[in-house]
Image (spheres, rainbow, N blue to C red):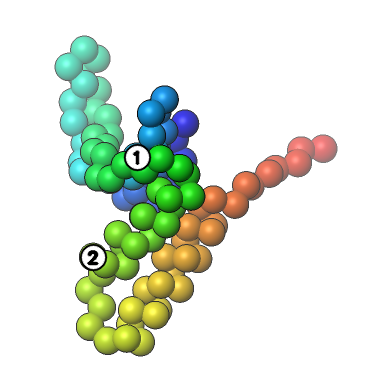
Amino acid sequence: MIIPIDDKWRIKSDEYCWHIQKLIGMRKNRQTGELEENWRSQRYYSSLAQAVHGLAELEIMTSDCTTLAEALDAVRNVSDRLSHALTPHIEIID
């Protein structure tokens, strides 16, 4: 399963764990010659909840905040973005 968060981050699962992955650029597929996204796992967790919490912590810890007010604003922004990314979006077609 792959859960896209934004254009920089996603959460991916395999049979063993959940990965926080970061897009590090584009690369050429050796077989097809087409450009494809190159994702690299940054951290690993045993549950989805831990992975979501870990991504939030990672983004806040690596932010450019210099004051408590900026850090609190970063927490709100990360929380809002993760909530939006993890909320099911259902389209009903008549």
The amino acid at mark 2 is: Thr
Where residue 87 appears, x then y in whole percent?
A: 59, 52
Where residue 66 appears, x then y in whole percent?
A: 22, 83
Where residue 48 appears, x then y in whole percent?
A: 47, 44
The amino acid at mark 1 is: His
Question: Which residue occupies 24% across, 14% down?
Answer: 32
**SS category of the residue bearing label 1:** strand
Residue 21 in view of the camera: no
Graded by Cα atoms within 10 Å as few (under 14), some (14 to 19) or many (20 or more), the crowding at tag 1 reads: many
Question: Which residue occupies 36% across, 55% down?
Answer: 55
The circle drawn on residue 19 is: 1
Among numbered discs 2 and 1, the one appearing first in the sequence = 1
Q: Is residue 38 left or right of residue 79?
A: left
Q: Is residue 19 left or right of residue 88?
A: left
The extreme front residue here reads 46
What residue is pinned by disc 2? 62
**SS category of the residue bearing label 2:** loop
Q: Is residue 23 left or right of residue 82?
A: left
The circle drawn on residue 4 is: none
- Quarter of image, res 34: top left
- Quarter of image, res 59: bottom left
Q: Nearer the viewer, residue 87 or 44?
A: 44
Where residue 4 appears, x then y in whole percent?
A: 44, 43
Question: Which residue occupies 54% across, 50% down?
Answer: 86
Which quadrant is the C terminus positioned in?
Answer: top right
